[in-house]
Image (cartoon, helix red, strand yellow):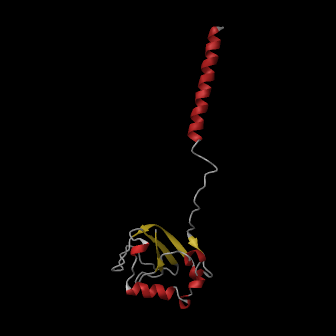
Amino acid sequence: MQTYGLLFVIAIGCFGLALICFSLISGDQDPMKAHAPEEPRLYEGATPQFDVEVEPGTYQYDPATGETNIPKNEFDLYMLYTIDNVDKMHLRLTPADQALTDKLKSPAGHWDQFPKAIQHMPALWTIAGHGLVLLRIK
C-alpha cells in the first residue's frame, strides 16, 4: 500500500513538473502583445503607373556624389529603397538629384497621383541615372 502512495506522489510531481515546463515554453506567445504592422510590399497609386513597390533590405547613398549601390530599375514601376547610411539631418542632395526630386514632387510630376503613404514620407527623394526609383531614410 505504501508503494502505491509513493508512486502516486511521484506521478503527481511529474505531472506538475510537465505543466510548469509547458507553461514556460508557451509563455512567450502573448496574444495581447501589440505587433507593429508590416509594411506592404506594394503601395497602390491612383493608377498603376504610380504604384510603388518596396524593395527589401537596406542600401547606401553618398549625398556628396550621388553614388549609390541600388540597382538600376529597368521596369515601369517605381521601386522604393531604404537608405541606412545617411540621417535626415545630413542629407544634402546633388543638384541633379534635387532637381529631379523637385520635378517629381511638383504638380507636373503628378505627385498627387502617388499613394498617400508615399507622399507623406518625411525624407523621400529620387536620383538620376537609376530609372523610376525612390529613396528614403531608414
Residue 124 in view (yes/no): yes
Q: Nearer the viewer, residue 90 or 7?
A: 90
Residue lying furthest bottom in this view? Answer: 108
- Residue 34 rendering spot, x and y as whole percentages: 60, 55
In this view, 84 is above or below 78: above
Q: Residue at x 41, y 84 (%)?
A: 97
- Residue 133 rendering spot, x and y as whole percentages: 47, 79
**Quadrant of the snapshot with the N terminus:** top right
Q: Nearer the viewer, residue 90 or 45?
A: 90
- Residue 61 rendering spot, x and y as whole percentages: 38, 74
Q: Residue at x 53, y 74 (%)?
A: 121
Q: Nearer the viewer, residue 19 or 79?
A: 19
Labels in figure, total: 0
Residue lying furthest top in this view? Answer: 1
Residue 70 in view (yes/no): no
- Residue 16 rendering spot, x and y as whole percentages: 61, 27
Relative horizontal placement of residue 50, taking residue 56 as reference (left or right): right
Q: Residue at x 42, y 85 (%)?
A: 98
Residue lying furthest left in this view? Answer: 65
Residue lying furthest front in this view? Answer: 89
In this view, 8 is above or below 44: above
In this view, 40 is above or below 50: above
Q: Residue at x 54, y 76 (%)?
A: 52
